[in-house]
Amino acid sequence: MSAKNTFKTAELMKEIMKKYNETGLRAKEEGRPVAWVTAVFPVELIYAAGLFPYYPENFGAVAAARKVAHELSAAAEGRGYASDLCGYARCGIGDAYSEEHPVGKILEPDLLFCCNTQCGSLPKWFEVASRLYDAPYFLLDSPRVGLETDHLCIEYFIEQLHEMIKFIEKQTGETFDYDRLTEVLSLSSEACRLWNEILDTAALKPAPFGFFDACFHMAPIVTLRGTQAAVDYYRALKEEIDERIEKGITAIPEERHKIYFDHIPCWPKLRWFSELFASRGALVVASQYTHSWAYSFDLDRPLESLAENYTHEFVNRCFEYRVNRKISFMNKYDVDGFVLFSNRSCKPNAFGLYAKSKLIREKTGLPGAVFEADMADLRLFSEDQVLAKLEPFFEQLK
Amino acid sequence: MLHAAGFFPYGIVGGSTNLEEANAHLQAWACSHSRSSLARALEGGLDFLDGLIIPHTCDTMRMLLDLWAQIHPLPYMENFRLPRQVNRSSARRYLLGELTRIKEGLEEYRGAPIKNEELIRSIELYNQNRKMLRKLNNLHSRYPGLFSSRQLYTVINASMIMPREEVNRLLQVSLEQLEEKENKEAKNGHMPLLMSGTLLEPFEVLDYIEEFGGTVVADDFQNGYRYIEADVSTAEDPLEALAERQLNRIPSAAFDVEYNPRRHFLTGMAKEKKATGAILLHLTFCEPENFDGYDNLKAMQAEGFPAIRIESQFGGTGLGQARTRIHAFMEMIGGGSR
């Protein structure tokens, strides 16, 4: 994200996210249930049921980006939630116990829905929150999937979607509207299609858009997929990017290298990283993270299609699948090297990363680096240590 | 299932303190259980294994098998993808499918089907083992003077690594001898305690509890009571019975149970066993346990049980601090050194 080249669509995002937050507050006032959900969750069902989906992970990411994660964590850490737990979870739990709310108060849930494709931290955090706010909790369980399509897992997930719909009906007292679900799925597919078209433009040489831009523009695909607002937003962004391509406006001034990056960015240092890479003529072009929201639903088989998409998400896949997928991104975007972030907050992404790095280097011959830090907590970030890993990496770029 | 297939099931609970080589592969903020287990494999301490199955109880376990397969492969490696919710009917159907998948994989590796009679014979052997361990556990909580808490948990843990036939034979002899003992009186002034956590380790904490006048009479450790509390029915289809047991086990950090939340289960157990306090053991970097810790502590205290949380690690680091804290706690609840 170039500071001088801010997208004008960014203003539109601020507007729609403001509207989204206001809707949440209004839902509380009007007694419409606020449902906590996780980022990789079939939120389409929540929208179809007319509940307001709230993303406590986003709350954590916002706190992280505003560099206050460690302050919010204090109230959680004082109660024994250790500083090695997921930074988002510490922000959420900390906020619940805090008098001060530097990024506003987390929206309290009436219901909690969690899917564990991403990790096991989210279910534990949601269990804590369910006790804290005395609100019913539903876990959508997705066993890990290997290289092949896993029918056992899909069938289990479909059965749970039926259980979840019954749970929602019981909580709301209203019959679930499958026609509405079809509409929501169609909007979600369209937003995902546009989002991935946008991400693809990073392959152009030079590119108008990169990973750090994607981090900035991803809020609607996480939060609002399934609504018209997300579709409209990404249409506008795509138009602006097309315009930039025409005018020759690029993401960074002199793009000499393309870099693959995993996974979540280091939020409080987003600008620092983006400027560091840009100063070396390196554009970070792709990450599995921003490509997570690439769903495509079959409207004739809504629940089956939801199960297929969400259980087979990359975060829920085996070592080999994830290495292959990283390499396929590296090929698609024709990168010159890769940087992997061993994120203290995210064990499922960090554990095995050194073996993955070695294997990718062997298979592709590309230079790569692994650095240690945290996506949220600045106390776990050392500029010197990160540079000590990245400087030799930059040296290797031809 | 492994026993029925003719394999020797060996439970890995850590084992190495030389973590240097493991640290190159697994970050230092992974729990010491995973690191010391992997380290043990890397230094050749597990070379007798033909295979490895890792159950998905947390993110670390979920990631460990694939990493292990990369750096120290074994002929047979498999994930046991446990359902993480155990309350709804979907969990049962799925678990049965997963058990069937694992059974078929074992049959392929073995080169012959696992017969129902074989499964039932093994289930009976394991039930017998657990039944005797429960008896031992009851004797310990009723007559703390008979043998120490450390001895109890040493026997339970031995059951994970010794041939069950042999363990059962030894247990039978020991139980007979213990029951014949005349002096089964409780130790004077010994304080009955509840312990809770993922894994009970290191066993030195049991020595400290004993030293300052305590006896562990209840726990929910995976290498403690949770391991022995429930049997597998022999009256139904063996796989269904195995699934049934898994779904009905007592709650833990990895599997909370909606109708029996862990914190209420713990306070209930403390009441039933007349515990005078609780020590919650948090294996450093164990995420599931950490997320439960505060609410468990509060629940204990709300029910009038003095309770503390203590951090522990495989390999015995930080033992001095654990001893000091246990000492202070025991003094607070009215115990003292013998």
Image (spheres, rainbow, N blue to C red):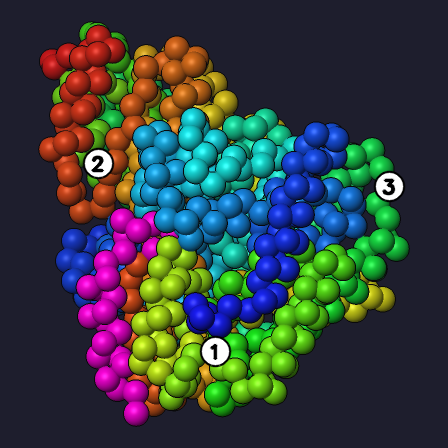
- Report the mark closest to the observer, 1 or 3: 1
Quarter location, residue B128: top left
Q: Residue at x 27, y 52 (%)?
A: A380
Q: Is residue A319 magenta?
A: no
Q: Residue at x 18, y 47 (%)?
A: B315
Horizontal and vertical percent for residue B72? 30, 71
Horizontal and vertical percent for residue B206? 21, 29
Left or right: B30, with B134 as reference point:
left
Residues behind callouts 1 and 3 on a single chain: yes
Q: Which tag, 1 or 3, sits closer to the chain's start?
A: 3
Q: Amino acid at mark 1?
A: Ala
The circle on residue A251 is 1
Q: Nearer the viewer, residue A23 or A92?
A: A23
Distance of label 3 from label 2 (alpha carbons): 55 Å
Give the residue number, with chain letter if any, for mark 2: B203
Distance of label 1 from label 3 (alpha carbons): 48 Å
Horizontal and vertical percent for residue B321? 14, 31
Report helix, strand or loop for mark 3. loop
Region in magenta: A374-398
**B303 over B140 or under it: above or below:** above
